Image: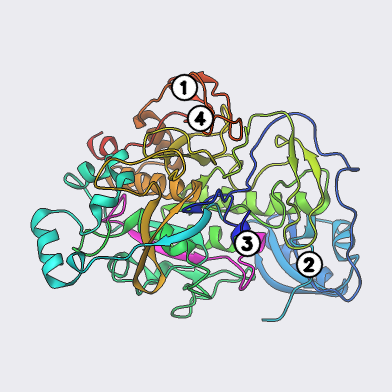
Amino acid sequence: MDSQHSRRWRRLAMPLGLVLTASLGLAGAAVASGQDAPASTKKDGEKLSYVVNTEADAGTVKRVKKEISKADGKVVTAYGKIGVIVAHSSNAKFAETMRSVKGVETAGATRTAPLESASTTDVGKPQFLKVPKSATGSEAKAKALAEDKEPLESLQWDKRAIRADKASKIDQGSKNVTVGVIDTGVDDTHPDLSANFSAKQSANCVGGKADTTKGAWRPYDPANDYHGTHVAGIVAAPRNGVGVAGAAPGVKVASLKVSEPETSLFFSEAVVCAMVFAADHGIEITNNSYYTDPWLYNCSDDPDQKAITDAVSRAVKYATNKGVTHVSSAGNSSHDLAATEIKDDTSPDDSKPVERTVNPAECPDIPSMLPGVTSVSSTGAEDGKSYFSNYGLNQVDLSAPGGDRRYQTPEEPAKDGGVLSTMPEGDYAYLQGTSMAGPQVAGVAALIKSNHPDASPKDVAWMLKAQAKSVTCPESYDPDGKGTYEAKCTGLKGNNSFYGHGIVDALAAVKK
């Protein structure tokens, strides 16, 4: 469908043109059986990364760290507050050994391919915008500021769809609220991001240990790791007379880089690090336009996958308890996440995938399916479900504009059905995918938090749903007329499988 690199983005974001997400959803029936799971291929001498999850007390963590060393492991970092230890080992029986240690609740490898020295949700390749001279320079900036409209705002049909343009005339959000973009890194030198970027709340979490060195949060390779920069602009590109406007142009954004160099895979130890860092550094909202690699679904009957779910769940719960609201993209495989069985032929994505049938109720998509995480589906310029978007009754909480370049056309002067936002090195491009829908909601969540600073994550999630624009199920859905993306919408106007509780509404967020 597209390159190996962009396979990871298929789940959440889709650069204009291709359906990029492979993040299947949650369903609910039979657990993936042992015969469906790939056999272990771990060999002595192959260094892997592991999460060892213990009772969350200092004594147990200290003792287990000693046991890790005895089992030929090396502790990378330990999050004692949640009882998660990240370790490396070349011992093929390391996880099995650690699971027998007193105080260890789960332990497993976070990947299937050996560590080497040294998967998001967008669809297709980015389509770069050739910015006209009339939209750049001092004259363009002066005109934009005079008209209270950003130079490229006329192309942002997505912001009009959620009434963010009208909301900005009332309230653009508070500088005291920060959205943490857990992603491929953010280019904070972009002229349309720098004013709202929070370096003190940013870090590189790749490997599981936070690196706050200046610039460590930026993309490894700007040409390929553009995803996080695009997401950041959707959330909070400022109204500064330059380029585009974000959903919450007055709030801050921080970069929590979690994607591996070259592969851009998002492993659990990095996600745990990002969640804990966000919680400990005053970040109010996280945007999660990815799924945790290497498993699209993490099944509870597989000890490695169970350990991944356990580790990330602990980190998400810790952050939630410290006041962090989490928004996640639902994925781009056009799957019904409320189905009873789903075929997963993409996992593990760091080595050779093995086809298996899973029950998402027992094999959750992490982090979208975790308790307390707001899951977002994608809509196009005509408010219809994007052809690529996952859906599911009581599995999708909200919907937001993520684009649909194939079947939905925006009103003039906008001509492209993708979402326009910032790209590394000062560029702009259109992308489509649930990766683009999630940050619209994260931005609106930041507006709510700005107006209700004492609101808990549960309160923010409830207000997002209560204020959303309800949309009725279509009588039928078959955008190409050939059954390729045919889907059945179920539920009521206020809560259905395509839209959840409705399309997010920025104007309502600043008026209520």
Q: CA distance from mark 2 to mark 1?
A: 44 Å
Residue 145: x, y in percent?
A: 12, 60
Please report the residue visible at 62 percent of the width from the left and 62 percent of the height from the top: 3
**Dot 3 corresponds to which residue?**
3
Q: Residue 261 location, x and y as percent?
A: 61, 73
User: Callout 4, which amino acid?
Assistant: Phe
Q: Are marks 2 and 1 in contact (CB under 8 Å)?
A: no
Q: Between marks 2 and 4, how big is the CA–CA gap?
A: 36 Å
State the residue position of label 4: 498
Classify mark 3: residues with Cα within 10 Å, few (<14), some (14-19) or many (20+): few
Label 1 – label 4 distance at C-alpha = 9 Å
Task: Classify mark 1: helix, strand or loop.
Answer: loop
| Disc 2 versus disc 3: nearer the observer | 3
Q: Nearer the viewer, mark 1 or mark 4?
A: 1
Determine if the magenta segment contains residue 268: yes
Of residues 81 and 409, the one nearer the viewer is 409
Reading the chain from its start, which is encountered first: label 1 or label 4?
1
- Kind of residue at badge 1: Pro
For image coordinates 59% across by 38% down, the residue present is 334
Majority secondary structure in the magenta region = loop
Magenta range: 245-269
Q: Nearer the viewer, mark 3 or mark 4?
A: 3
Task: For marks 1 and 3, give the CA distance.
Answer: 33 Å
Residue topped by disc 2 = 113
Labels 1 & 4 near each other (Cβ < 8 A): yes
Q: Residues within 10 Å of mark 1 (few under 14, many from 20)?
A: few
Give the Cα separation between the discs numbered 3 and 4.
28 Å
For residue 481, say whether it is visible: yes
Query: Which numbered dot is residue 45?
Result: none
Mark nearer the viewer, 2 or 4: 4
